[in-house]
Image (cartoon, rainbow, N blue to C red):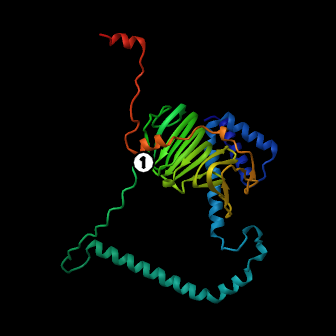
Amino acid sequence: MNSSYEAIQKELAELTCRVLDHSLTHAEDARLTEILTEYPELIEDYTNQIQIDAVLTADLYTSVPEGVDLETLEPAAYPTVVAEEVKSEVGRSISLWQSVTVVTAVLLVGIALWLNAGWWDGEPVNQVAAISEPAPLALSHVGMLLDTEDAVWADEDLGEEIAYGTRFPAGKKLWLKSGIGRIRFESGAGIVLEGPAQIELCSPLNAKLNYGKIAAYVPDEAHGFTIDTPEIQIVDQGTRFGAVVDPLGKAEVHVFEGQVDVKPQSAAKTLNLKASQAVLFSRQNEQGSAIRLTPTKFADVPTPEQLTAAKSGNYPPWKRFPLNAKHCRMNMP
């Protein structure tokens, strides 16, 4: 790796930090877009850093007691003097318990080593090994590729072309460089993915869309199907919906039928969107702003017939063999 590429990586990391602390200028925003366009292989590093920040921030907000506004807390509000007084009162008993805990641990370790080494004079005692119950078997796969349209994949194991009917295990990451791919989840939900896009199939009811365009058809049996993005979480409530996520974290949600719940990753408030509504979310506007519903922006979702055929376990139902004039002449009597 040459020094200029390392410099680009370092610059991307610095710009990403500026995004996370909401201090990115317009010029830096343009530079960030330029880097991700010129070096698409760095998009995954960028989205992973954004995702990690979102998860850590969400955990922070979750740990705050209900009714406490984290944004309004100030360092001066913490009772530091009281903490020192409490420490002076209970410091002695804490030290005593710490000493007891350490001594107990040392004794237990010593007894275990003595027994395992066989350092005793009596007859050995027959020991019965404890047999733990087998863990429940995990699903061998969580999704299946239904069909594609001019799809070009970037997969270390499967290459640029993935065959119809290919089953994906939990945690499988798919990078669609271009074209369209339709996937059925074991829960019964069906999605269409349009490249460039990167998605992780987490479970029969959950996927993470790092960036790209997606539309979903969710029947009643898959109620609660969830799409996570770096900035928001989309929870189905029985619907057809679409979402667009760009590498900078902006996300559009379009609801065509039914309704969805949308929750920013770093906030506790949930927004309920109903049919014919569309909202744009960003790091600067976590509550979202209304935009025009655009169904034509998204490719067709998997049909109920496709989902039913895939559920039967016999998919694809038939294979197509190309016929040409030469082949027909060779097989004529």
Residue 254: where, in percent of width, then height?
66, 47
Observer-nearest residue: 41 or 313?
A: 313
Q: Residue furthest right?
A: 26
Q: Is residue 105 above or below residue 209?
A: below
Q: Quadrant of residue 120?
A: bottom left
| 10 Å crowding of disc 1: few (<14), some (14-19), many (20+) | some
Q: Tell me which corner region of the image, top left, top right, bottom left or bottom right, holds residue 314.
A: top left
Depth check: 49 or 223 in front? 223
Q: Residue at image x 66%, y 66%?
A: 61
Kindly identify the residue that appears in the image at 77 percent across and 40 percent down.
30
Query: Measured along the vertical axis of the image, is residue 48 above or below residue 113?
Result: above
Residue sitting nearer the eye, 60 or 148: 148
Percent position (x, y) of residue 256? 64, 47
Q: Which residue in the structure is indicated by mark 1?
A: 141
Residue 37 seen in render: yes
Q: For the point 39% across and 49% down, which residue is it?
A: 140
In the image shown, does 66 or 116 lie closer to the viewer?
A: 66
| Side (left or right) of 289 relative to 230 | right
